[in-house]
Image (cartoon, helix red, strand yellow):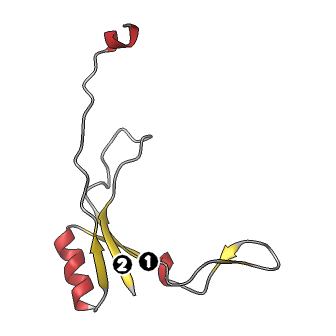
């Protein structure tokens, strides 16, 4: 049972930074998904894929993983880069 710990990033459609301060512990996929013979939908018997735990800091997530014996991978937050551009630059 392994997990990954990462910080939520805002997507391209978001202008605000709501919920981007939270850290998530998400379990890795333990078994491959197989198509259901009747409906064709993909599914598996692994219920831990559905679990996402939110934490206020990476230290809290790491403490939870250590306390429960969960192997984890900490994914660092990529640096934020800003592209400073004036409106007039669209017409050059």
Q: Given contact means CB atoms under 8 Å apart, are the residues at marks 1 and 2 in contact?
A: yes
Rendered location of residue 31, percent (x, y): 55, 84
Quadrant, the N terminus = bottom left
Which comes before the other along the chain, label 1 or label 2?
2
Label tally: 2
Along the viewing direction, whichever of 8 and 18 lies nearer the viewer: 8
The quadrant where residue 74 appears: bottom left
Judging by the rendered image, the residue that carries numbered circle 2 is 3
CA–CA distance in space, label 1 to label 2: 5 Å
Near mark 2 (Cα within 10 A), the count class, few <14, some 14-19 or many ≥20, is many
Residue at image location 32% in from the left, 55% down from the top: 19
Residue at image location 39% in from the left, 7% down from the top: 91
Report helix, strand or loop for mark 2: strand
Near mark 1 (Cα within 10 A), the count class, few <14, some 14-19 or many ≥20, is some
The disc at residue 28 is 1
Report helix, strand or loop for mark 1: loop
Horizontal side of 17 relative to 33 (left or right) equals left
The quadrant where residue 56 appears: bottom left
Along the viewing direction, whichever of 43 and 54 lies nearer the viewer: 43
Rendered location of residue 75, percent (x, y): 28, 65
Rendered location of residue 80, percent (x, y): 24, 44
């Amino acid at each position: 049972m392994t997990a990954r710990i990462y910080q939520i990033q805002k997507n391209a459609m978001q202008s605000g930074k709501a919920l981007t301060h939270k850290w998530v512990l998400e379990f890795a996929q333990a078994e491959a998904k197989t198509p259901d013979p009747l409906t064709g939908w993909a599914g598996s018997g692994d219920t831990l894929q559905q679990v996402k735990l939110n934490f206020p800091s990476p230290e809290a997530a790491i403490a939870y993983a250590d306390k429960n014996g969960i192997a984890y991978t900490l994914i660092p937050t990529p640096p934020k880069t800003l592209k400073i551009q004036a409106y007039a630059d669209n017409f050059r």
